[in-house]
Image: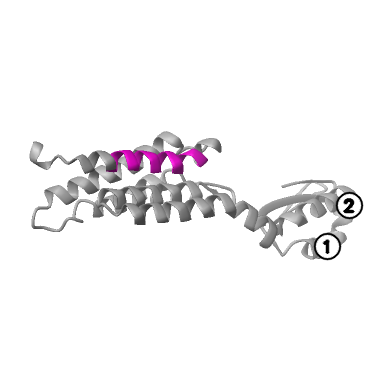
Amino acid sequence: MSEHFELLDIYKAVISLIAGLILGFEREMKDKSAGLKTITVITLGSTLLSILSYKLAGNGDPTRIASYIVSGIGFLGAGVIFKNGFNVYGLTTAGIIWIAAAVGMAIGFGAIYIAFTFLICALIIIYSAKYLTKHYMQHYHNKVLKFTLSTEQISNKKLILNDLKSIAKEVTEVAFEKKDHLIQITVDIHISSSGIEQLENYLIENKNLVSFNY
């Protein structure tokens, strides 16, 4: 057993621990499902499997065991992704799980500089993405808007849809329902962050609407 032990393996474990803590810190601060402990354990586990793959391969392929990390980590990442209506959450966390495993593998195979190069690149985009999207990219949201008109006001439907189209990037009518003397219309709206306040003001001020929600 001792013939396979190297002091370098301890260094790799420590470096992997540090890398996992760095990646997991941001998720922990945002109270995500995969936080500091999860990301760190993933990084350590990937490093260990890579070390074992390299040591036990002998004259065989040293990537054989490690290759299963790539497919296995996909199932773990899928577990933190969930859909709520038209919105999908957890994709960033799943991506961090993926890069944590990749960094751990690189450390396990001894590519320390490569591992930390990509770790730094990942941190740059994680922490700067919000700033970049806020100042240089228009951010859009998908909303499901339901508004109600009385049957006497149904003639205003086309006018309201045209007004919504002037506020949002895309407006698609998906449902039309009548109940007693009321008509409920459901539309999908693709709207920018800056347009949401304008949409809310329009809905509040429109006297033709009996009610609305989104």
Q: Is residue 83 left or right of residue 170?
A: left
In primary-sequence order, the first of circles 1 and 2 is 1
Tell which of 13 and 179 is nearer to you: 13
Rendered image quadrant of residue 67: bottom left
Does the magenta portion include 80? no
Residue in the picture at 59% in, 48% down? 85
Label disc, if present, on residue 206 of the rendered structure: 2
The residue sitting at 37% across, 45% down in the picture is: 76
Instruction: Establish if 155 lies above or below 208.
Output: below
Q: Residue at x 72, y 47 (%)?
A: 214
Q: Residue furthest front?
A: 7
Figure quadrant of residue 167: bottom right
- Magenta residues span 12-26
Q: Which mark is residue 182?
A: none
Q: Residues within 10 Å of mark 2 (few under 14, many from 20)?
A: few
Residue 131 on image: x %, y %: 64, 53
Determine the residue positioned at 50% across, 36% down.
28
Residue 35 appears in the rendering: yes
Q: Which residue is mark 1?
A: 163
SS at badge 1: helix
Q: Are marks 1 and 2 in contact (CB under 8 Å)?
A: yes
Of 151 and 139, nearer the camera is 139
> How many numbered dots are placed on residues in this image?
2
What colour-coding does the image apply? one colour
For mark 1, does the 10 Å Cα neighbourhood hold few (<14), some (14 to 19), or many (20 or more) residues? Answer: few
Residue 186, position as x, y percentages in the image: 71, 54
Q: Position of residue 181 (x, y in %)?
A: 83, 48
Task: Give the dominant element type of the magenta stretch: helix, strand or loop.
Answer: helix
- Alpha carbon separation for disc pair 1 and 2: 11 Å
Horizontally, residue 7 falls left or right of residue 130, namely: left
